[in-house]
Structures are given as structure tokens and as C-alpha cells.
Image (cartoon, helix red, strand yellow):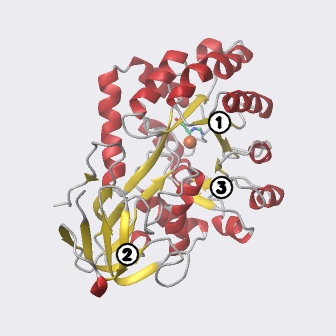
Amino acid sequence: MSTRVIRHIGELITNDRTVGDGTAMGRLSDAALVVDEHRVLWCGRDRDAPAADEVIDANGAAVVPGFVDSHTHAVFAGERSDEFEARMAGVAYDGGGIWRTVEATRAATDEELRAQSTHRMRELRTGGVTTVEIKSGYELTVAGEQRLLEVAGEFSDELTLLGAHVVPREFAGDRDAYVALVAGAMTNACAPLARWADVFCDRGAFDLDEARHVLESAARAGLQLRLHANQLTDIGAIGLAVELGCASVDHCTHVGDADLDALASSSTVATLLPGAEFSTRSPYPSARRFLDAGVCVALATDCNPGTSYVTSMALVIALGVREMGLSVDEALWAATRGGARALRRDDVGHLGVGARADLAILDAPRAAHLAYRPGAALVARTFRATREPGERADIEPSRP
Ligand code: NIG
Ligand code: FE
């Protein structure tokens, strides 16, 4: 097993309270970090750094935990920039465009789907994402949802069955039959390929009874639960998510005080997706309100062709700070440790000893530049630990 020491780190964010400044950020300056192919072995002051097989000189740059993007729909074919343009000219989003991506995705060969998804994954990874959740939901047949999960499985093991994304056209006259298909044959066929199940529970998508039925079937099939909730309107989806023990409720654009209290006394994380508000020109929810109520908040890209064709967690952090009332530290934590909480993971989202060696070296002396310099490509190198025996640690090359 070879070891690496990253020396001369200007600012190291570990998200480990036992390290450095004693805050949730676990911040150290003039730091060093030692990793092997899998794990963090040591972190501390640079002058105390132990020897290792390889030395990487950070030259005073900041190092942060790799971003945990806990909500994407990144496996699909095609794009819908025309809808974005129409929205910017005043047309409201109602979820209707999902069907266009279903048609494009169904028509794509495996190779086309893989090539387009690989491109997006590369954008995410070079932007510092080391853990990514990927949902199905753009084929809406048993075999098609299996295919999406199989392709997504080439990139991640945080996979989510989202058969209940919209009712497909061929079931337009009989939505009950589609819900039965999702809760039955689709869940059974896809459960071995996925870890999670999700439902788009909102106006124009699936109602509370349908969501409950799909999620309860998924739980019986061994899947853990998450929910698209309160994106377009409040139909009570957050209460359902808390009741069913969902790991995360995602979007939360429209949330009342009672739901905040319910979330605060639950283990359900609120995953906010400012790329969706940006791309649909919707009002941003106040993340400050969530934190003040005691809710655990994650930030994620929601990468999808309709409401948020965003692959930059740095942009998401910047929007979280500028538009949602988060401090820079709170936004960075939400994009790393918060995302890990939303995926019920303790091994990622921080750089304490024993954590996965997933990290990003920035092209900046302080992590605050992620929000301070929006639009700049600030991730110089992404390190992603080996996942499988025999797999090599994945190190994205420095940008030229
Ligand atoms: O998270 N809300 C449902 N699903 C996606 C949108 C998908 C699409 O428009 O293609 C979302 O916003
Ligand atoms: Fe989504």
C-alpha cells in the first residue's frame, strides 16, 4: 500500500471537530494530510508531517473534503435548453418536460447513454465531487429503469430507483396501473441494483397515497427511502417522509414551520437544491430558517436536463451563501458532511483519520474562495479513494 503526504496546505477543512480549531469545520492552517489508497491516515501541522512514499506540495492551497453530491439525475440522454430559455422568458415550470427526456433516453443506445453520462461524471469529478447519488427515472419501464441503474452503477454505488418520477404517456388513462407496476414488478426487479427509492411527490406528479404505497413497497424490498418533496407546492410530503423515516427530503422550496419542527426532531436531512431555483427562476428557500430551526441541511446539484443542468458544487455553495442565507462554512459543510448525512454515510464528507481519502485541492488559499469567486474553476485536483480491491485510486490530473 503506498502512502502520500500532501504538504504545505494553506487551509485544511476536515469537518472533524476533534481536529484544529474545534469547530464543526475542523480547520487547520499550515497543515499536512497523509493518505493511502483508501483512507486518511494522519492530519496535523505541516511541521509535524510524517514521511510518506510520495510527497504532493499543495503550495499553500486549501484542501477540502471531496463534495458529496447527494441528489442527481445524471444518467439521461439529450438536453432541454429550449425549456430553460422559455422559462427565462416567463414560462413557469410544471414538471411537464420530464417526458421529453424519457423519450430521448428510451431512444438512446447503451453506448450513447454511457458516453453522455460519462461526460457529466467527468464534470462532477473535476469539480471536486467524490461521492454522487444517481437516480433512475427517465425510462419508466421495468427494463428501462434497470438499464439506467446498470449504467449509473458504472459511476457510483449510491443508486436510487425513481420509477415514480412521472406517469408515462402509455399509462395516461390508468395511473393506478403504473403505480402498481412501480410498487410491484419494477421495485422487485430494481431493488438488487439500487440502495434507495425515491418518489416525485408533488402537484402534477404523485400524490401522498401513491408515494406512501411506492415507498412502503420499496422498504419491504430492502431499499432505503428519500423523497422529492415541496418543490412546486406543499401537499404534505415532508410529513410523510418523516413518518416513513426517509434519509432525506429534497428540494423543500415551500416549507411551513410545522414541517421544520418535524424535520428538526427527526433524522431526516433537508437537501436543498439551489440549482433548481436558479434554473426555474423560483424563489430560493431560506436555508438559514432550516438551520435556525435545528434541521440538518445538505446542498446538492440536482443535475438533470430540466430544472438544474448543474454539475458544479462550487456554484451550489455560492448560491447557498448568496441566496439562501448560509455562511461560507455552513454551505461548505452542507455540500460535504451534510451530503454524507443525507446518504447516511460516515466514511465520506470529512477528512478525519479513518475517513475515505476523498478530497479536493483548490486553486485558492482559502476554501471561502468557492463562494467568493463564483464561476472560477477552483478545484485543481480531485482525489478519490479506491472503492474495490484492485481498483486504483482515482486522481484527476491538475488542470493545465
Ligand atoms: O429534481 N422534480 C423532479 N425531478 C427533477 C426534474 C426532472 C426534469 O425536469 O427532467 C428535479 O427537479
Ligand atoms: Fe431531483
Dot 1 falls on a residue whose secondary structure is strand
Crowding at label 2, few (<14), some or many (≥20) Cα neighbours within 10 Å? many
The reply, left or right, for residue 162 in relation to residue 304 is: right
Q: Which mark is residue 135?
A: none
* Residue at (22, 75) in percent of width and height: 51
* Residue at (19, 71) in percent of width and height: 55
Earlier residue among tags 3 and 1: 1
Residue position marked by numbered label 2 in the rendering: 43
Residue 312: image location, x then y, percent: 40, 55
Q: CA distance from mark 2 to mark 3?
A: 30 Å
Residue 186: image location, x then y, percent: 59, 20
Marks 3 and 1 in Cβ contact (< 8 Å): no
**Residue 123 in view:** yes
Q: Amino acid at mark 1?
A: Phe
* Residue 61 against residue 185 in the figure, above or below: below
- Residue that extends furthest to the bottom in the rendered view of this protein: 47
Marks 2 and 3 in Cβ contact (< 8 Å): no
Residue position marked by numbered label 3 in the rendering: 270
Q: Nearer the viewer, mark 2 or mark 3?
A: 2
Q: Which mark is residue 200?
A: 1
Q: CA distance from mark 1 to mark 2?
A: 41 Å
* Residue at (63, 57) in percent of width and height: 283
Earlier residue among tags 2 and 3: 2
Crowding at label 3, few (<14), some or many (≥20) Cα neighbours within 10 Å? many
**Residue 375 in view:** no
* Residue at (44, 72) in percent of width and height: 14
